[in-house]
Amino acid sequence: MDFLIFQVPMLTVQAVLDGLLLGILFALIAYGMALQWGVMNIINIAQGDLVILGGYIAYFMYLYGIHPAWGVIVSPIIMYFVGVIIYKLVINKVVDRDLFISILATFGISILFMQLMNFAFGADVVLANSGYGTTMLFDNSVTLPNSKIFSAFISIVFAIGLVIYMKKSKLGRAIRATAQNARAAKILGVDTEKVYAATFGINAALCGVAGALISITFTIHPYMGLPYTIRSFMIVIVAGLGNLPGVAISGMGLGVFEEFADYILGTEFRIGSVFLLLVLILVYRRFKLSKKREYLK
Amino acid sequence: MKIKNIIITFVSAIAILFSTSVVSLAKVVGDKIILGAAISLTGKYSSNGVHTQNGYNMAVDRINSMGGVKVGGKTYMFDIIYYDDESNPKRAAQLAERLISQDGVEFMLGPYSSGLTKAIAPVTEKYGVPMVEANGASRSLFTKGYKYLFAVLAPANLYLDVAIRTAVELNGGKGVRIAQAFEQDAFSQDVRLGILDAAKETGSKIIIDDKLPKELNDMAATLAKVKATKPDVLVVSGHTKGALTAIRQIAEMKVDVPMLAMTHCDAAKLSKQHGANSQYALCASQWHKTLTYKDDFFTDGMTYDADFTKEFGYAPPYQAAESSAALLVFKDAFERAGSFDQKKVRDALAATNMQTFYGNIKFAEGGQNVDKPMVLFQVMCDDAGKCENKVVAPLKWASAELIHPIPKWSDR
């Protein structure tokens, strides 16, 4: 245990700001997961791997002399098609099945993606430099990399854009209708097959944006996807399906929680504390449910 | 009739199996000495696995083209059977088992990484197969009492020991305040133990002691603490990820620290990925091309560097150099043993005392090389932003003077 964070007030400010910026980025990934979980009832274990693949797209643009920030436009376009292809090849065969089968299928996709990325891009850790500099606050005692601020800003733009799209566009309405009741939507003429493909594509595109942002704020490696899957899973569990403002708030909350866990318990417990929180929340929910409902014991 | 057919098929299958294994059950076939190696050609260690394989191959070609190995008046050529261990310790142990019991290999070369070497060592030990390894530096490999394991590299606890001692020296012999962040893996934790020892001996104080998770990609919290506590030295070891993340975030957060020492800068290609931001970082290395060690096969570091670059199209990282050195050690041991008896070769290996282009090699009781110090290089960049690694410690090998303390970010 280390309580330095409370002795130096500026560290608290730093932790909160770092956590919020990080949390917004997590929320974007979780947003995609919540969307396709809600619509298709599929928990996508390959979520983090799609993020990393999106990151590699931005990285390769950077390698060829294009500023990696353009990755937030190019990467989602490519990733949308990657998502649709994965849907057509695998997901459409498991979409109506048991949740367990879809978990297994996406777990398989995750392993396949890791190995393919390792094969294609090599096992080196890579990153793209944005050259965005740093914002310094409070006489240089709190520093915020502009790349993180940029990431949070882009995440917010994409999230708001998607909310509007879901409300106003025809496809958005069809997606929402399918999420509410797939059978009824089908009877009323919605091509649910198309809706599913588009939903999975949109999820992959969001992962693509997040990946591009991660390549300019952190590092990219073929085997680094899992922590992103876990975090988005956690955020969706806390927020509940279909609760988009909840996803944003729970994302930022998780970001700040992680930072504080890092300062107080140590960096080694960062991911562990996320797991612990997940367990606590699930137990708490169960406890609340058991109080609310009468059921046979 | 049917049963008879099945029996005949079964018996002949077994007969074929035996006949093939009898053919391959020999470590020295004709004029060939066949060594076995499980290498990470796929999986997360594949980059360094390939460096290791290239290092081995380079040395095999060189030794063979310069007359091979002379044992008992006869000349033999080296050959290596490789298997891909997929960067997986369990697989590596299975492959070692297969190399020894099926392929009949009687001498092994090591895999890449401490973790995989740890998985293989019990197997080679069980069969009494001498193994010369070049990429497992973890201290725990050398404290288990293995008799058939020999490592040409310096153990992990010595990696950054030089950095602390240099910092103390520059502080007028007084202890320094150290902030450290190490990944939670066998290797990095051994580097940490080395720092703890050095700190104790020099009267230094450790003020931050963070352990980094395997899936590390954010060190902001550690670095914010460093900013708040202002240590004299910041030490980071977390493989390539650690080195890249640290440099990125130190530059972004404008963390001023008089000395920054780390491992795996070579593999991370720090200056290539981060340019001038990586300037002044001190990096522990097993080898550097400018060191003036010599041998008859590769002449010296500069020649090795040039030859390797010509053959493989990239400059050799130290992982390749130490792998090449492993073959030189084997050749020397075979010739001194004058036999292919495993016990005799093992004893000859234990008595090794030689110089290679990579460094001096002499094994301690535990199998680690005690005759080759680690070197520290510092990333130095010119005004045009072109960066180079220059050896700054130990002084005997230094090709440039250490820049200390690191200039503040506001002055850069």
Image (cartoon, rainbow, N blue to C red):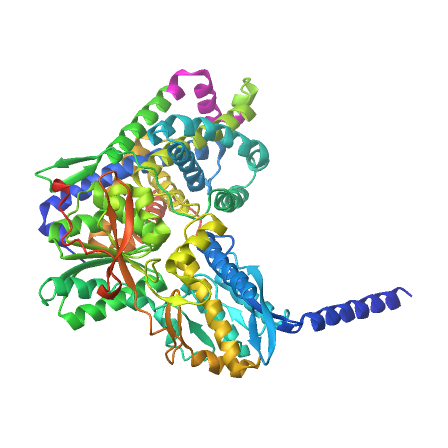
Q: Is residue B322 above or below residue A104?
A: below
Relative to residue B202, is residue B153 drawn left or right? right
Counting labels gives: 0
Q: Is residue A183 visible?
A: yes
Instruction: Measuring from the top left, give residue A54's x and y in whole percent.
Output: 42, 35
Which residue is at a point 48% across and 66% down the rendered structure image? Answer: B110
Main secondary structure of the magenta stretch: helix
Instruction: Measuring from the top left, give residue B405's x and y in whole percent.
Output: 13, 53
Which residue is at a point 57% across and 60% down the rendered structure image? Answer: B83
Relative to residue A58, is residue A254 drawn left or right? left
Q: Is residue A23 above or below residue B329?
A: above
State yes or no: residue A174 in magenta: yes
Q: Nearer the viewer, residue B370 or B257?
A: B370
Q: Which residues are magenta?
A: A165-183
Instruction: Measuring from the top left, give residue B373's x and y in whole percent.
Output: 30, 68
State yes or no: residue B155 in magenta: no
Q: Nearer the viewer, residue A148 or B268?
A: B268
Q: Nearer the viewer, residue B120 or A231?
A: B120
Relative to residue B340, is residue A38 drawn left or right? left
Instruction: Measuring from the top left, give residue A108's x and y in whole percent.
Output: 53, 45
Q: Quadrant of the N terminus of chain A?
A: bottom left
Q: Is residue B131 visible?
A: no
Q: Quadrant of residue A254?
A: top left
Which residue is at a point 59% across and 36% down the rendered structure image? Answer: A93
Relative to residue B82, is residue B52 drawn left or right? left
